[in-house]
Amino acid sequence: MTLLPSCHDVQTHLTEYLEGALPFHRRLGIGVHLLLCRVCSGVLRGLQALPWVAKASLKAPETAPEEARRALADVQALLRKGSR
């Protein structure tokens, strides 16, 4: 039996590790592995960046194209017309 988890084991449980959902001994083993393994620590950094990447990709553009403005105006006009 080895003291440190394998790369496969670490990468399989990284989400749980980030969420703090693992027992202490598992967190400790993964933590030590991450200190020693550049590959797994890179995967961890990638997972930690996901929320930022998702927010950035969903951000509305600063200026909408003219077609989008016209479409929005048409929809708003129809909504106003329907509420009368």
Image: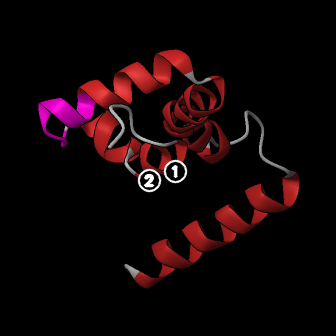
Residue 17, given in percent of the width and then of the height, sits at 31, 37
Question: Mark 2 belongs to which amino acid?
Answer: Thr
Q: Which residue is label 1 attached to?
A: 8
Q: What is the number of callouts on the image?
A: 2
Which of these two is toward me, 16 or 2? 2
Residue 39 percent coordinates (x, y): 65, 31
Identify the image quadrant of residue 52. top right
Q: What's the residue at 56%, 78% (across, down)?
A: 78
Q: Give the range drawn in magenta.
A: 21-27
Identify which residue is drawn at 37% across, 79% down. Answer: 83
| Outermost residue, right side | 66
Graded by Cα atoms within 10 Å as few (under 14), some (14 to 19) or many (20 or more), the crowding at tag 1 reads few
**Residue in the image at 77% along x and 60% along y:** 68
Helix, strand or loop at label 1? It is helix
Dot 2 alpha-carbon crowd within 10 angstroms: few under 14, some 14 to 19, many 20 or more: few
**Nearest to the observer: residue 23 or residue 70:** 23
Whole-percent x and y of residue 33?
45, 26
Residue 3's place in the image compared with 10, above or below, is: above
Q: Name the quadrant of the C terminus.
A: bottom left
Q: Are marks 1 and 2 in contact (CB under 8 Å)?
A: yes
Residue indicated by mark 2: 12
Q: Where is residue 47 in the image (x, y as percent from the top left)?
A: 52, 38
Q: Which of 67 and 15 is in front in this view?
A: 15
